[in-house]
Image (cartoon, grey):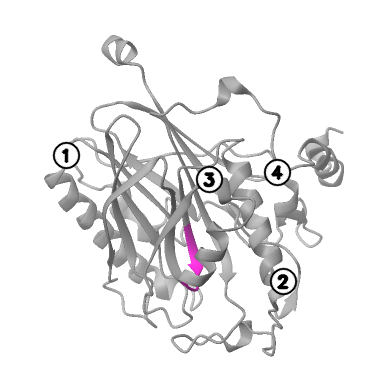
Amino acid sequence: MTCHQCPMRYLILCTLLFLHWLPPKDLKGQRSRGDLCILWYNVENLFFPETDSLSTDLEFTPEGVRHWTFSRYHRKLTSLAKVILAAGSWEAPDLVGLCEVESSEVLEDLCSHPLLESCSYAYKHWDSPDHRGMDVACLYRSSRIDIIQWTAIPSLVKLDGTRDLMHLSLTFGKNDTLELFLAHFVSKFRGAGTTAENRRIQAAQLVRCVDSVQKIRPGGLMLIAGDFNDDPQGFSLEPLRSAPVGKDGLKRIIPVSDPLVNGSYKYRMRWIHLDQIYFRDPLGRFYASASILMLPPLVEIDKEYGGVKPRRSYQGYRYHGGISDHLPLVGVFRRIPSRSRTER
């Protein structure tokens, strides 16, 4: 029996290999100034442990039913900081897209965490009308990224105050431009069938936004990252699959997965790619790749369905001590040398 066939033995081996969360330092693997790395992560209920008058977050307070204390909050921030560092393999990601973030206050605490202080992270955030106060946000390394402009785009779906889309125009590397869209679509809480049309409306709206920006700035790199709450081949995401954006459309980066983890989210026995990255590179300047970040602290043995599953913060109302019910998705864009592009 191989280690991959024995989840417990495999996890023990991985724990030893990733004892300090980070892989061995390899200077050859360091990103050059023209490269770009983005981490996308649904961080599952990142609340500040005090009542927010703008949202219904009473359960995520020390006195609430979940007993969300400052100790638990700081433990989660430390774990998230470790994930961010591990995602970049000794060179922190240039961009970190997050969803299920409550407020600017938690982003301020995350950016100023001792583990991330040297990364010069700043953030962009907008309080969307989500009924639980859950928003999309973006961290960026101000030493490597310049934000030209950014905006929150209200969702056309008004179901319980759905999360806004986020659009950022930025520059990086050698005067390269990037149009970045971050999304968190309607969940399947009321059932996959009853909510699919809402996600389809959001996908079509996102495509229209991307197409509008492409017509204004046609030559730049375009990137979409998000939790789309559906499989890439699902009915609701058809507008993304057939997006008429420029002559090449949008391409989904199929992530490399660990043998035990074939998706970013697990529903019963099935792993699903709810978290996805799409891109458009009209000038062919970058090699694009993606991977699902599988580190032992992020998963646990799945006693009910076998294999492993994400180790989440709560199981029902009981504190479980994990980070999220999703796994992070890492996208890397490496600049192709000019000579190689010519030869291609």
Amino acid type for the residue under numbered disc 1: Pro
From the image, which quarter does the C terminus lie in?
top left
- Please tell me which residue is depicted at 50% across the width and 42% down the height of the picture: 93
Q: Which residue is mark 4?
A: 260
* Circle nearer the viewer, 2 or 1: 2
Instruction: Report the magenta residues as a range.
Output: 98-103
| Contact? badges 4 and 1 (CB < 8 Å) | no
* Circle nearer the viewer, 2 or 3: 3
Looking at the image, is mark 3 or mark 4 earlier in the sequence? Answer: 3
Label at residue 119: 3
Amino acid type for the residue under numbered disc 3: Cys
From mark 3 to mark 4, how far is it between C-alphas? 31 Å
101 shown above or below 9: below
* Circle nearer the viewer, 4 or 1: 1
Looking at the image, is mark 2 or mark 3 earlier in the sequence? Answer: 2
From mark 2 to mark 1, how far is it between C-alphas? 45 Å
Residue 9: image location, x then y, percent: 87, 41
